[in-house]
Image: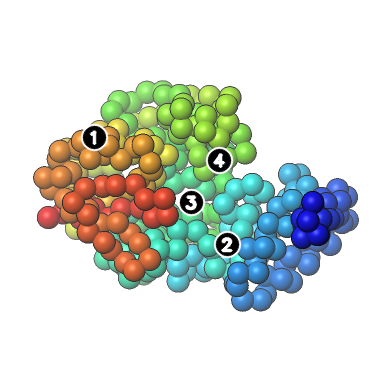
Amino acid sequence: MTLKRHFRNAVYNTSKFITKSYIGANLYHSFISFLKKFPDKSWKGVALNVIIQGNWETFNFPPKKVSVGDIPLILVPHFGEFDFTTVLYKDLPYEIELYTFLDKQIKNYDIVIDIGANVGLFSLYASKKIENKEGVVYAFEPSPEAYRRLLNNRHLNNAHNLKPFNLAIGDNSGFLDFFEPRGHLTNGSFLLDFAKIWDENPAVIPVFTTTPDVVQKLVGESKRCLIKIDTEGYEAPILAAMKNFIIEKKPDIIIEVLLEYETAINDLDFLKQNYRFYSIENEGLVEKAEIKAHPSFRDYFLTPK
């Protein structure tokens, strides 16, 4: 074993040891809060790798201030989840290219529909961006635990124009099995095979599904609408269910595109006939003839022709 590896293991073990006690974990947390005051540089990535070695499973982190795009938010960190980075970072290092694009784009909308809202990161961001024009964000999240966290984050950010629903969108109203990997709340899906990537035996949760008619009523006669769909591989079935609404209202759409699930989206002819496809990348929008998953840039912006 190299000296470098010995040193790394010693640091990791120290992190684990300190957080075994309540007092040690609190002192460690205070030190992390001090480090957060410094600029977000590459060293924070190294520091975070050390921090996550600690025994934080039962530690209740207080809410943290963090910037998402150009919007300051307050989020509650959860060990093992994407929002844990808020303990150390001033600016959330998550889908940076998406929020860079939206910083200028999202102000154009009267209504934003967030399908697969999870703990509400995008919904909160959107609600703050359009609140001055009396815009409204409707967030749909089927997972009971993710929805609970969404409500808490909504309260912390005083986001009164964010209207959450503990529902999924689908073809029919009724119950559908939702597969939630333990320790991977952001990766819950209606696709068992996808959930098994993270947990061989994901929790099976019956959740209530409603039809796109609900979205139609919420949008009403609004002029500009943005729909964001991030449902861990289940984007194509939702788009198909919303076909009539999409053709009639012609909303702009942001969808997450994952490897192995792009074909199902490309097979939706009504999208090809009515929309242009743009990959959201570091340099901005890059137009594509068809949707193709990218290992680094997962989001696409679809806008009517």
Q: Nearer the viewer, mark 2 or mark 4?
A: 4
C-alpha separation, residue under disc 2 versus residue under disc 4: 19 Å
**180 or 198, nearer to the observer:** 198
Return the residue found at the far front.
Answer: 2
Q: Residues within 10 Å of mark 4 (few under 14, many from 20)?
A: some
Residue type indicated by callout 3 = Gly
Residue located 38% across and 41% down the image: 259
Residue type indicated by callout 1 = Ala
Residue type indicated by callout 4 = Leu
As drawn, the label of residue 39 is none
As drawn, the label of residue 120 is 3
Callout 3: SS: loop
Q: Position of residue 236 (x, y in %)?
A: 29, 36
Please report whichever mark, 3 or 1, sits nearer to the chain's N-terminal start.
3
Residue located 83% across and 51% down the image: 13
Please report whichever mark, 2 or 4, sits nearer to the chain's N-terminal start.
2
Q: Position of residue 184 (x, y in %)?
A: 57, 40
What residue is pinned by disc 4? 185
As drawn, the label of residue 74 is 2
Q: Nearer the viewer, mark 2 or mark 1?
A: 1
Position of 205 relative to 225 (above/below): above
